[in-house]
Amino acid sequence: MLLGVARRLLSMVITLLGVSVVIFVILRLLPGNAVTASLGVSAGLLSHAQLAALDRYYGVGQPAVQQFVSWLVAVLTGNLGVSLASREPVATLIGAALPVTVELALVAIVLGLLIGVGLGMLGALHPGRLPDSVGQGVAVVGLGVPSFVLGTGIVTLLASVLHYFPSSQSFAGFFQNPWLNLQQIIFPALALSLGIGAAIMRTTRAAILEVSGQGFVRTARGKGLAPRTVSWRHLFLNSSIPIVTMTGIQLGYLLGGTVIVEQIFVLPGLGRLLVTSIANRDFPVVQSVTLLFAAAFVVVNMLTDILYTVIDPRTRAR
Amino acid sequence: MTAVGGGLLGHPDAAEVGLERRRAGWLRTLWRSRSGRVGLVLVGVVSLAGILGGVGLTPENPGVQSSSAVLRGPSPPHLFGTDQFGRDVFSLVLQGMGVSLEIAGIAVAIAAVVGTLGGITAGLLGRWPEALIMRGSDIIFAIPAILLALAIVTSLGASVIDSALAIGVGYVPIFVRVVRGPVLALREADFIRAGRVLGFSRRRLLFGHILPNVGGAVAVQTSLAFAWAILAEAGLSFLGLGPPPPTASLGEMVSQSSSLAGVAWWTLVGPSLAIVLAVIGFNFLGDGLRDAADPRSRTR
């Protein structure tokens, strides 16, 4: 068990190292010099010597391998560098944006689980009946309507029909103003959760239908257990592995989805930071944020694996 | 010995008969499942729209602005209404669908070819090539695909080819995984061993026996990849990272409409409808293909 975790951790570190190389290589292909881009028009006023000095200061002129190694060493020692655009430490920028994205992702996944597991179980317990059809309909719409279309629709509806636009006020942290914070988070989370819910719903329905055909479920029903007990203890628990797998996968997609949805709802999260930084050719920020997203994805995958062993004792062997 | 002999003699015939029957009934099987039917129809409609838009057979010239017909609601001459420049939204949507399908098509082709080759190589060769390919695909897979596309597009530019490349790269690992699993199982399958013993060339084994057997999985994934690529393309152009302006793009139309949708809802509905129908169509087609390839997964 311990050896397994150690091996998994090592493999995770290697993957992340690979990720950092890939991101570094892709971003070094970027046309345009980040230093001149960050200076805007005033870059034209600088002499060659001044430009060279700036390049040296930001390390832009060095060979790529050297840049990579020095960046990696700095990251490992906790120094993410300084944003070329705002001159603030990258760690500060990320520190401010991270809680917003984490909150958004958590609310979205909880909503997705509620929608998905709820409709999925309802549908599987009454296959072919009305709740099932409703669930299937929601799944088709949820898988087909991209979060940015849904988000744009929600924003438009709220703003123009109901004259309600919580995002017009500056973002409130949960601990500053919980009520405003909730209003600002719930709609983007809803836009994200429909797709997640649809995927989880389909998985739940299929898993429960499969389990409910098995003998022990019939036995449980036959010996007179309450239907609710059978639903949760026999059906749900035995279907939870595929549901957990799908939730893990969706959490991964969710990280990417926040990028677009934060843009629509003007949430100052990591996704918005990333898009702004890409527009500004702000390498240090883009590098760190992308690496952070990848790290989160890898960690989620590992947690999913560990969760299997908690749920299903049979997977604990080896 | 008799068992091996039976396998050797029995197999090639059986394989060919099976293959023929599968080819003949392929479309019929697909049509028989509800998902396959809905998928085929939707993908057909969307493809037709894309082709019409791609070759310029739109009811009106999508580039022509008209100050006398600004923000008109849907009506017979303008099915999806007109936008803030008086352009016909329906024609713009057809054109955008064409671009979208073109980018998605190239992206999926890149992902399917590279991924399938990678998966077969990994599955057949084993040892270090497999380790290298699987590690590489794990690394790509660890970067959320839309972020990867975002990074590549910012770096290469947003022309049609660059967008397609950016979107395709992220889907390669999925093809690698989908193909490698069956290939691993096939490598040790009796009929492959038999073929090897009979002295079939590597090429014959690969193209005659291994590829057809992973073809179903690849077809399913190709359809799902199409749905994803259309979503990703729309997402990128929504963020302003799609092909530059003269090229129409569905994502950009959605993003533009957000400031107008309060007064002109049709500017949001037109392009959204096109994206949604395309995504649902390819998803259903993928489900249908899965049902056709594997009767056990048939949904009730």
Image (cartoon, coloured by chain):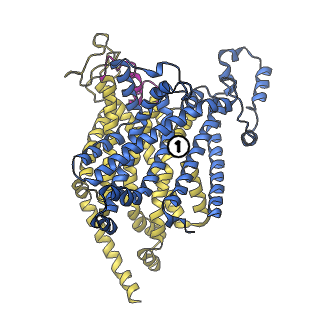
Quadrant where the N terminus of chain B is found in the figure? bottom left
> What residue is shown at x 76% (from left), y 40% (from top)?
A70
What's under tag 1, amino acid-wise? Pro
What colour is chain A?
blue
Q: Extreme top residue here?
A: B68
Query: Residue A77 or B134: which is nearer the viewer?
Result: A77
Q: Position of residue B171 (x, y in %)?
A: 48, 47
Locate residue A51: give its quadrant: top right
Q: Secondary structure at mark 1?
A: loop
| Whether residue A146 is situated above or below residue A51 in the rendered picture | below
Task: Give the prevailing secondary structure in the magenta stretch.
Answer: loop
Task: Please give the letter of the chain rendered in yellow.
Answer: B
Q: Position of residue B274 (x, y in %)?
A: 32, 34
The reply, left or right, for residue B243 in relation to residue B257 is: right
Q: Which residues are magenta?
A: B241-265
| Whether residue B14 is situated above or below residue B96 in the rendered picture | below
